[in-house]
Image (cartoon, grey):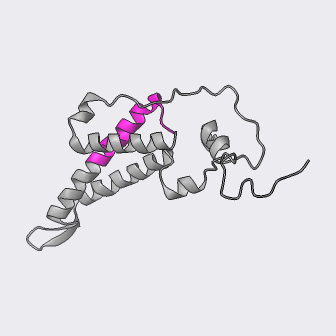
């Protein structure tokens, strides 16, 4: 039995995307603590995964979307990114089509297949964190209008 679309966190659903249908907010949703999660030790041994961990955490912090509870999701994303880069380097070395057998039959490289699978995984993780252009286009951010511009104070309002 299908349960419909998975619910989005209130932070993404209402605060960033807006609520055009005026649905009720989830007032009992747990709030994740803000901050950077601790990088797992095994990720620090992989230079590509560790660099991506630092980059993605920096980006998510700037967007104020990073929580200390995001560690496992970020770990899976960084591991998939490292495997993608490894498969990509092997595709560059061996090519995306291999000629096998005495008759030189073309066959898709298993590295190319793995690279495509990891790129799909990465795309899903990036959407989950709101880091793709289409995911950002669905978000709505409220802007504080209290900032002054160069025209403030020119016309005095009498009251």
Please identify the residue farthest to the bottom as the structure is shown.
Answer: 103
Q: x, y percentage for residue 133? A: 51, 58
Please identify the residue farthest to the right as the structure is shown.
Answer: 159
- Say left or right for 67 vs 102: right
**In the picture shown, does residue 79 fall above or below 40?**
below
Magenta-drawn stretch contains 73: yes
Q: x, y percentage for residue 140? A: 64, 50
Residue 4 in sight here: no
Q: Nearer the viewer, residue 159 or 13?
A: 159
Instruction: Name the residue: 85% across, 52% down.
Output: 157
Q: Quadrant of the N terminus?
A: top right
Magenta-drawn stretch contains 90: no
Range of residues picked out in magenta: 65-82
Residue 31 in sight here: yes
Instruction: Name the residue: 28% across, 51% down.
Output: 84
Q: x, y percentage for residue 18? A: 69, 47
Q: x, y percentage for residue 155? A: 80, 57
- Say left or right for 104 vs 47: left
Instruction: Name the residue: 46% across, 39% down.
Output: 61
- Say left or right for 64 vs 77: right
**In the picture shown, does residue 143 fall above or below 32?**
below
Rendering quarter of residue 38: top left
Picture mark count: 0
Instruction: Name the residue: 61% across, 38% down.
Output: 11
**In the picture shown, does residue 62 fall above or below 85?**
above
- Say left or right for 89 vs 153: left
């Amino acid at each position: 039995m299908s349960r419909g679309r998975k619910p989005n966190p209130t932070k993404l659903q209402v605060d960033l995307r807006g609520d055009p249908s005026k649905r009720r907010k989830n007032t009992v949703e747990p709030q994740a603590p803000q901050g950077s999660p601790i990088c797992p030790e095994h990720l620090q041994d992989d230079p590509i995964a560790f660099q991506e961990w630092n980059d993605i955490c920096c980006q998510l912090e700037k967007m104020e979307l990073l929580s200390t509870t995001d560690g496992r999701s970020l770990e899976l994303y960084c591991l998939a990114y490292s495997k993608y880069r490894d498969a990509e380097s092997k595709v560059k070395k061996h090519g995306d089509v291999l000629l096998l057998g005495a008759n030189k039959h073309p066959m898709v490289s298993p590295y190319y297949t793995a690279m495509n699978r990891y790129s799909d995984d990465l795309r899903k993780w990036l959407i989950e964190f709101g880091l793709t252009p289409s995911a950002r286009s669905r978000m709505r951010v409220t802007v504080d209008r209290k900032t002054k511009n160069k025209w403030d104070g020119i016309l005095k309002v009498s009251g």
